[in-house]
Structure formats: structure tokens, C-alpha cells
Image (cartoon, coloured by chain):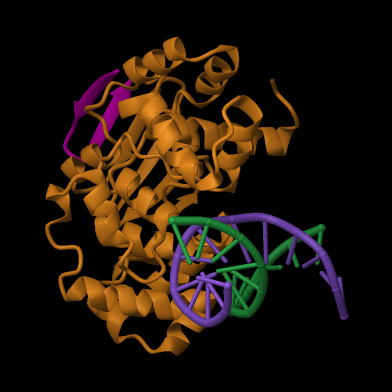
Chain colours: A orange, B purple, C green
Amino acid sequence: MRILHTNDSIVIEDCRYFDVQATLSCGQLFRYHQLTDNSYVVLSADKMCHISHNQDTVTITGSDREYWHRYFDLDTNYEHKCNVLMQQGDDNIQHICQVGKGIRILNQDLEETIISFIISANNMIPRIKNTVAKLSATLGTPIADGYYAFPTMQALADADIEVYNNAGCGFRGKYIKSSANMILNGAIDGIDTLDNDNARQLLTKLVGVGPKVANCILLFALSRGDVVPVDTWIKKVYHKYYEAQHKDRDISQYLSQLWGQNAGLMQQYMFYFERSVDKLGNIL
DNA sequence: GGACAGGTGCGGT
DNA sequence: ACCGCACCTGTC
């Protein structure tokens, strides 16, 4: 993979391990829009970029090139990570890695990730995307034609509960409002310096953040690559491909120890694979 | 109309 | 510490 920074864009050549569609669609982020030419607009915090993928070249256009460089984790060697996982796994695991090998783990904005994944609880991706878009349009500042920044914690704390109901948050509206208040009061200050267990403990004090959502925040915003969020899809994969019979609440720790520093990436491969199987029929 | 998908909070033990 | 139930809304 070769990366070239030009004045207004990042060009990534020879990117067999960067599949834009797979990376965007595996449930890490909720603010992206597909355009008619199969390219995408991606929004994060108060920034936006345009990303397109043709043959073996990915082009990212927008200001804040350094932000997007880190966001798309361009300094990490995913070919190496994928190979390590494939060498550790059996035929099934190798096939799952092969299908998902273009997925990258994004480095997302912490506050946006917290609020987005509170919305994700007991919810489905299309509705999460819709709700986050509506909240941003209502409470976020405009950053381009029809595009809005993610709302600040202050805006979320101040918002009337009606705003949350109208955005389709359902019962999660009150969770967001109070968690935004807690964040403003310093509830997650210094979380960067804590180890996984202590960081998770801090996050689960927020209302609407349980173990699964906390693990998503750790993996997708705090670069904790050994953390494995376990949702219904991962439970399905676990019971399908693993002999071990852990209770649901123990699956995360088991897979984390099994795959080590690449466990979160393996989780993304599994999530993407199982949903592909669900859409296309059994492709094993 | 009614079942279903999907994590967390809460009340009971 | 662990279990079982309620929760909001879009879709079939």
C-alpha cells in the first residue's frame, strides 16, 4: 500500500487491504452516504470527506487530511494483521478473513461514538443511521450543503426531550441527554490513560452504556484492538464455529484472549461475514 | 393486527 | 451475583 498526500486529497495505491464498502458497512460508523457513482461522503465530528474506490486505488478528498489519515488508520499494516489471524485459524476462520480482509478499524471521535452507540442499543443499522442523521440536522451546525456536524455534548444536554422523540431515539432519548450531561461534568476525563477494564468501568457508568456498547467505544474510538464487542451476530458466529461453550457474557473475554491484539479486527471480519451469509445464503 | 429485531436498566430473588 | 422482563419503532 502506497500513500500519497496531495494538496487536497490522500491517494492510496495498491490497496488490496482497504475495501471502502466493507469498511463503511460493517457497523462501526453511522454517518456515511453512498453517492450515485459508488463513492461516499463520510462525516465525523465536525468534519467531512469524500472517498472513492476504483480498482486498486482509494482517494480521500477533503480538508483535514491528517484527521482522515488517522481516522482510516492508514499507518497500520492490515495485510500483516490479516495474515496473522489466518495463520492462527482453521479453514473456516481463514475463509472469514478472506471475505473481510479489506475491513479497517476506524479511529473515530470519542463523544460521537459514545452517543451513536447508545442509540445503537437494541436497534438496527438503518434506523440508527436515520436517527443520528436527524439528530445532527436538528442540533448540529451546518458544515456543507445538507451536511451537519455531530451535535456537541452541550447541545445534546440542553435539547428538549421532544427533539429526541422526533429524531426516533425512542426510550434512548433520556439516556443520551443524561450521558451528555455526565460527559460535560467530566465523567470520562482521562479515559485515554486507563487500561481496558478501568476504561470500560468508567464508560458503563454512563446511562445507556452496558458492556457491549462500552466495548464498541473502546474498539472504534479508543484504539483498543484487543476488545471484542459481542452482539447477536457474533453470538451466532461463535456458536456456529467454536466448540467451546461459554455463557454469552463470557464470549467477549474468550475471543479477546484467543485473538489478542487483533481480536477486534477478527470481530469485524466475523460480523461482516455473518451478515453477508445472511444476505446471500450460505457462501461457505 | 401482531410478531419480531435488538442491548440496557431495573426490580426481584 | 444472577435472572426475567419492559422498553421504542420500523418492517414484514
Type of secondary structure dominating the magenta stretch: strand
Residue at 33% over, 43% down: A219
Which quarter of the rendered picture does the C terminus of chain A lie within?
top right
Q: Horizontal placement of A220 versus A167: left or right?
A: left
Residue at point 52%, 77% (across, down): A171
The span shown in magenta is A1-14
The answer to whether residue A45 is visible is no
Where is residue A111 drawn, in percent x and y? 27, 62
Q: In this view, does A61 lie above or below A149?
A: above
Residue A239, percent across and down?
63, 34
Q: Quadrant of residue A226?
A: top left
The number of numbered badges drawn on the structure is: 0
Relative to the observer, which residue lies in front, A245 or A270?
A: A245
Work out which quarter of the rendered image holds the N terminus of chain A and state it: top left
Relative to A6, is A86 above or below? above
Give the percent coordinates (x, y) of residue A154. 23, 78
Magenta span contains residue A110: no
Q: Which residue is drawn at 15% across and 50% down?
A: A192
